[in-house]
Amino acid sequence: MHIDIQFVPSPPTLEILSNKTIVVIDVLRATSVIVHALSQGAAEIIPVTTVEEASHLVKTFPKGSTLLGGERESQRIKGFDFGNSPKEYTAERVKGKRLILTTTNGTKAFHSVAGAEDVLVGSFLNIRATVQRCLDLGRDILFFPSGDEGRFSLEDVVCGGMLIDLIAKKSDTRIDLTDASSSACIVYQRFEGSLVEALHLSNHGKDLMALGLGEDLFYCAQTDITDLVPTFRDGVIRK
């Protein structure tokens, strides 16, 4: 099994995506929101790239069936039902509902890898379940951190490094790591004892703390609170 990770979210070519399992990671906070919301009973999540697309799309569904979530500059978009804090997405509010989500980085990342056959949603919240799903699929793997507006994102690479480290330890077959994958493992091992430290040190984490959203860092740094591994296919994320 060959494992690679992209340190910055430039869209891969179809050749790179071919016959691979892709895992999109946006710890702060899109993939954490997606995993949490689906674990709370949301029916499906449609990630879109723009506010305008989200506002138009919601009108095409029956009234009351679909809710809007997302952020710009880390804050809830005017007129939306939710921002981008996982704990907003409670079972009472999302169970049985369709969600349309647009965020600065994470929702764009899904469309960057839409040509792949299997696109999984990765986070710390479902990390060991994601490892097992990758092993069950048995393909080469590309981890795709969503980054921070096109830049390297520490928390996403730490999550990717943890996934790679766990896969390498659990796999019964040979694992071939790229230099990037080996580097991600080294970065993860620096924070292995305190994942939340990586989130606090990251630029995006500091921005969230400045906005009074520091609780999200602690929530998103939790591991294995669900065994759900959502899949993105045909423009929709489902359980």
Image (cartoon, rainbow, N blue to C red):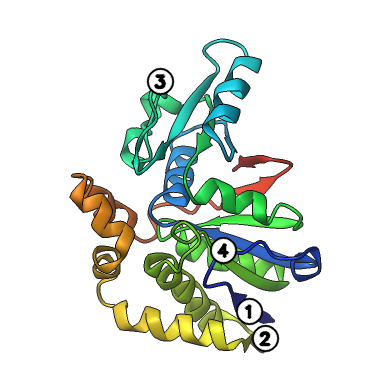
Q: Amino acid at mark 2?
A: Thr
Q: Earlier in the sequence, mark 1 or mark 3?
A: 1
What is the secondary structure assignment of the residue under circle 2?
A: loop
Q: Amino acid at mark 4?
A: Pro
Residue 141 placement, left or right of 80:
right
* Disc 2 from disc 1: Cα separation: 12 Å
Q: Which residue is mark 1?
A: 3
Identified at 80% across, 66% down, the residue is: 18
**Residue 61 visible in rendering:** no
Give the label, 2 or 3, closer to the camera: 3
Which class describes the residues within 10 Å of circle 4: few (<14), some (14-19), or many (20+)?
Answer: many
Q: Which residue is mark 2?
A: 173
Residue 64 in the image: above or below residue 113? above
Q: Amino acid at mark 3?
A: Gly
Mark number displayed over residue 9: 4
Which class describes the residues within 10 Å of circle 2: few (<14), some (14-19), or many (20+)?
Answer: few
Identified at 68% across, 57% down, the residue is: 113
Specify the farthest residue to the top: 63
In percent of width and height, residue 86 lies at 36, 42
Q: Earlier in the sequence, mark 1 or mark 4?
A: 1
Q: Earlier in the sequence, mark 4 or mark 3?
A: 4
In percent of width and height, residue 84 lies at 38, 40
* Disc 1 from disc 4: Cα separation: 16 Å
In percent of width and height, residue 7 lies at 52, 73
